[in-house]
Image: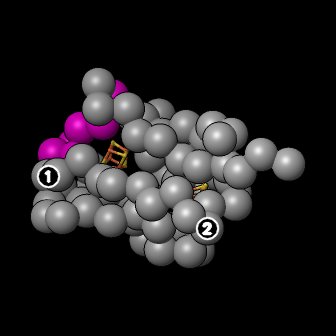
């Protein structure tokens, strides 16, 4: 079975339009795989441990996150 991972689109992500620059997906990941260096930065996704649950996808109001198989 392929491993899943979440990817963020730099074209679609606009952190400044989210919770005062804080990515809304960070807190929903059950494995804490999403990190933001600072408010208004595009978040980073760590691939190791992602189960493709989609919680981050649903949390993003701009549909900037997608799940892919790797
Ligand atoms: S919730 Fe979506 S648009 Fe907002 S910072 Fe996170 S990935 Fe970007
Ligand atoms: S799909 Fe689930 S496990 Fe993977 S980064 Fe998103 S919230 Fe985390």
Q: Secondary structure at mark 2?
A: loop
Mark 2 beta carbon near ligand 2 (under 8 Å)? yes
Observer-nearest of 17 and 25: 25
Residue at 33%, 28% (x, y): give it.
12
Observer-nearest of 52 and 49: 49
Q: Residues within 10 Å of mark 2 (few under 14, many from 20)?
A: few
Residue at 30%, 53% (x, y): give it.
43
Q: Is residue 17 above or below residue 22?
A: above
Residue at far bottom of view? 31
Q: Secondary structure at mark 1?
A: loop
**Residues in magenta?**
12-17
Q: Is residue 6 above or below residue 68?
A: below
Q: Is residue 56 magenta?
A: no
Residue at 14%, 61% (x, y): give it.
39
Residue 20: x, y in percent?
17, 58
**Residue 61 falls in image quadrant:** top left
Residue 44: x, y in percent?
33, 54
Which label is found at residue 49? 2
Residue at far top of view? 11
Residue 68: x, y in percent?
63, 37
Marked residue nearer the N-terminal end (1 or 2): 1
Q: Residues within 10 Å of mark 1 (few under 14, many from 20)?
A: some
Residue 69 visible in the shown view: yes
Residue pointed to by mark 1: 40
Residue at 68%, 39% (x, y): give it.
69
Verify CB contact (< 8 Å) between mark 1 and mark 2.
no
């Amino acid at each position: 079975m392929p491993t899943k991972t979440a990817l963020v689109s730099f074209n679609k992500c606009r952190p400044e339009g989210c919770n005062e620059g804080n990515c809304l997906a960070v807190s929903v990941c059950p494995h804490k795989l999403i990190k933001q260096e600072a408010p208004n930065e595009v978040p980073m996704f760590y691939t190791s441990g992602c189960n493709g649950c989609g919680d981050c996808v649903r949390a993003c109001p701009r549909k900037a996150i997608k799940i892919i198989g790797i």
